[in-house]
Image (tube, rainbow, N blue to C red):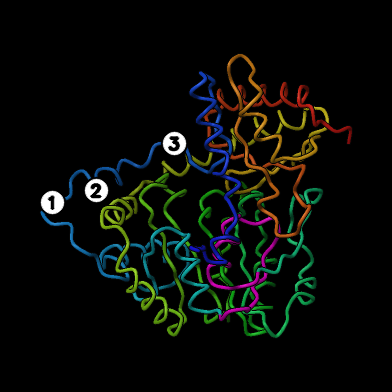
């Protein structure tokens, strides 16, 4: 009898994408669906990126170098140097999105049954990447009451074992929108140094910080150059999700040698994606200023609307473009499906991501949803009205 692998059977379904068939069915019924489930910005990609593809003069789309197109890596190194991350092109390997970057980083540094610490809730695909590499994720809990703030750094000592290979930190955070302080990142770096473990720093939302202080990278922490593996992507920064271009950045030569071997095994990242990403490096600062202002406005509209709803609590995120809200519902998976299958208000409904899929601990996040505020304010307001009505009609509403 033909059977699937254990990994195939245990690979979790994405809480972000698993409800897509229900959304498609709703649309076929003529229902307008407000997509708040996925971090797909509606803001236009920079003209510089699009023009780089339109105006290229290639007459043959050949394999790029496994580490990435040299001129792009040179330009990317200059970008990092401009934000005081002092790396060179040979300390950068271009990947097929930030997802592949973390997959390869774990493959290069971890053996089967090694442990990696992560703040919970966390980006759901971390689960998948760990499973693919036979790595055990060890969650450190954070709470919605504190805005998912990083717990006291001393807590991390309790989770470190002889099997610990590293800590994943996502800053600013997906799914919570948390923004960790400079002091917190420095302390995480000190722990990585003390225990001789890696710090995998997922910084794909670097440009989406809503404080007066600039983003503080793990690469800024002195003395841990050999411990840090930076995970990056152009998907959110330049609204280029579909080009699938990311990067692994590290000053650890052994790590980068291993990364290149894995990169060679998959040949290369997309040529046109790299052309677009290289073009995006010329994006003017005004683009980022406008995007930041727009997202801050969207965030404020969303958070105000949510916290006005009876029984709803949502802390104010200070980064990325996500928020996790606690709702008066019995089960967020059931609620999210009900929104698409049975509910509509003025021929409209909302698609959210059930938050339980962002937790490793069973039973957590069942009354929470992640909302991506990636729609224009007018649509956000309409979506929040739908949600408010839905919560009043939902059969599984609770009294808490």
**Is 134 inside the magenta-drawn segment?**
yes
- Name the N-terminal-most of marks 2 and 1: 2
Residue 264 in the image: state x and y as whole percent. Answer: 32, 74
| For marks 3 and 1 on the same chain, the one whose residue lies earlier in the sequence | 3
Where 86 sits versus 147, above or below? Answer: below
* Res. 188 image quadrant: bottom right
The circle drawn on residue 240 is: none
Q: Is residue 184 above or below residue 365?
A: below
The span from disc 3 to disc 1 (Cα, nearest Å) is: 27 Å
Q: Secondary structure at mark 1?
A: loop
- Residue 328, image quadrant: top right
Give yes or no for residue 130 being in the magenta stretch: yes
Circle 3 sits on which residue? 43
Q: Which residues are magenta?
A: 111-136
- Furthest residue toward top: 346
Determine the image quadrant of residue 195.
bottom right
Q: Would residue 243 appear left or right of 24 to someone viewing this image? A: left
Task: Out of 121 and 206, give the one closest to the viewer.
Answer: 121
Give the side of residue 254 with respect to residue 36, left or right.
Answer: left
* Residue on which the image places disc 1: 57
Residue pushed farthest left? 59
Q: Residue at x 26, y 69 (%)?
A: 65
Identify the secondary structure beneath mark 3: loop
**To which residue does mark 2 refer?**
52
Mark 1 is surrounded, within 10 Å at the Cα level, by few (under 14), some (14 to 19) or many (20 or more) other residues, namely few
Crowding near the residue tagged with mark 3, few <14, some 14–19, many ≥20 C-alpha atoms within 10 Å: some
């Amino acid at each position: 009898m033909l059977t699937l692998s254990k990994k195939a059977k245990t690979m979790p379904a994405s809480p972000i994408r698993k409800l897509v068939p229900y959304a498609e069915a709703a649309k076929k019924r003529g229902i307008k669906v407000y997509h708040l489930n996925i971090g797909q910005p509606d803001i236009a990609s920079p003209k510089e990126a699009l023009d780089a593809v339109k105006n290229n003069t290639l007459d043959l789309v050949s394999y790029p170098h496994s580490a990435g197109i040299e001129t792009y890596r040179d330009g990317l190194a200059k970008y990092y140097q401009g934000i005081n991350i002092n790396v060179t092109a040979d300390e950068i390997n271009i990947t097929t999105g930030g997802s592949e970057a973390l997959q390869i980083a774990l493959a290069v540094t971890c053996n089967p049954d090694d442990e990696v610490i992560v703040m919970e809730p966390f980006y759901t695909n971390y689960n998948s990447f760990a499973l693919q590499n036979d790595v055990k994720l060890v969650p450190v809990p954070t709470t919605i009451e504190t805005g998912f703030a990083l717990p006291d750094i001393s807590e991390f000592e309790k989770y470190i074992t002889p099997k610990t290979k590293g800590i994943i930190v996502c800053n600013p955070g997906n799914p919570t929108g948390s923004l960790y302080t400079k002091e917190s990142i420095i302390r995480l770096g000190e722990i990585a140094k003390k225990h001789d473990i890696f710090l995998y720093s997922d910084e794909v939302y670097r440009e989406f910080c809503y404080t007066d202080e600039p983003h503080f990278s793990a690469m800024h922490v002195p003395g841990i150059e050999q411990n840090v593996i930076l995970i990056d992507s152009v998907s959110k920064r330049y609204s280029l999700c579909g080009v699938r271009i990311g990067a692994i950045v590290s000053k650890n030569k052994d790590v980068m040698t291993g990364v290149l071997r894995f990169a060679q095994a998959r040949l290369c990242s997309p040529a046109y994606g790299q052309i677009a990403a290289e073009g995006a490096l010329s994006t003017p600062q005004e683009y980022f200023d406008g995007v930041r202002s727009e997202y801050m406005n969207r965030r404020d509209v969303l958070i105000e609307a949510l916290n006005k709803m009876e029984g709803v609590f949502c802390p104010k995120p200070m980064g990325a473009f996500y928020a996790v809200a606690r709702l008066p519902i019995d089960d967020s998976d059931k609620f999210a499906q009900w929104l698409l299958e049975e509910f509509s208000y003025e021929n409209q409904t909302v698609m959210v991501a059930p938050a339980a899929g962002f937790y490793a601990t069973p039973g957590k996040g069942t009354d929470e949803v992640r909302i991506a505020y990636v729609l224009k304010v007018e649509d956000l307001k309409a979506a929040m009205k739908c949600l408010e009505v839905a919560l009043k009609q939902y059969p599984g509403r609770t009294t808490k």
